[in-house]
Image (cartoon, rainbow, N blue to C red):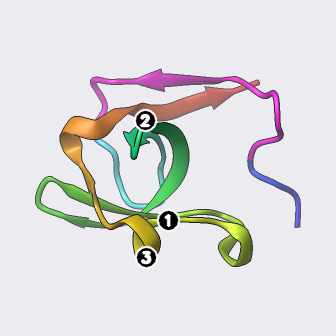
């Protein structure tokens, strides 16, 4: 399986677009900026999973991401 993003790639995000299920988002959690895929939305909290499930930390490890911690929804990568 091909990675969604490769090390060194850049992303362009949109702050004004509300994340939807399946979208990649950039957020800050535990002083780290991370990129993960939205797998569940509960009100203003987003549950995220890494695409490489066996080697990724995600909401199962650190809990839901609050909407205030979201930097933006990924709209383009290069």
Q: Residue 37 placed where, x, y %?
A: 51, 56
Mark 3 vs mark 2: which is more N-terminal?
3
Q: Residue furthest left?
A: 43
Q: CA distance from mark 1 to mark 2?
A: 17 Å
Q: Is residue 8 magenta?
A: yes
Q: Position of residue 54 (x, y in %)?
A: 71, 78
Query: What is the total number of numbered labels drawn onto the structure image?
Result: 3
| Residue drawn 70% across the image and 23% down it | 10
Neighbour tally class for label 3: few under 14, some 14-19, many 20 plus, Cα within 10 Å: few
- The residue tagged 3 is 60
**Do the numbered discs 3 and 1 sit on residues whose CB atoms are within 8 Å?**
yes
Q: Which residues are magenta?
A: 5-17
* The magenta stretch spans residue 10: yes
Residue 58 position, x and y percent, is: 49, 65
Q: CA distance from mark 3 to mark 1?
A: 5 Å
* Residue at (66% x, 74% y) in the render: 53
> Is the residue 69 above or below the residue 37 in the image?
above
**For numbered disc 1, what is the local secondary structure?**
loop
Judging depth in this view, the residue of 56 and 19 nearest the camera is 56
In the structure shown, which secondary structural element does the residue marked by tag 3 occupy? helix
Decide: few, some or many residues near mark 1? Use Cα within 10 Å; few <14, some 14-19, many ≥20. many
Residue 12 located left or right of residue 69: right
Residue 58 is tagged as: 1
Residue 73 image label: 2
Mark whose residue sits in front, 1 or 2 = 1
Whether residue 37 sits left or right of residue 77 in the image: it is left
Position of residue 43 measured from the top left corner of the image (x, y, whole percent): 11, 60
Picture layout, residue 45 above or below residue 42: above
């Amino acid at each position: 399986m091909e990675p969604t993003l490769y090390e060194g790639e850049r992303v362009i995000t949109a702050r004004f677009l509300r994340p939807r299920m399946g979208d990649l988002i950039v957020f800050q959690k535990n002083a780290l900026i991370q990129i993960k895929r939205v797998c569940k939305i509960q009100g203003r909290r987003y549950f995220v999973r890494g695409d490489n499930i066996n080697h990724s930390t995600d909401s199962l490890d650190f809990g839901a991401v609050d909407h205030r911690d979201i930097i933006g929804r990924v709209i383009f990568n290069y």
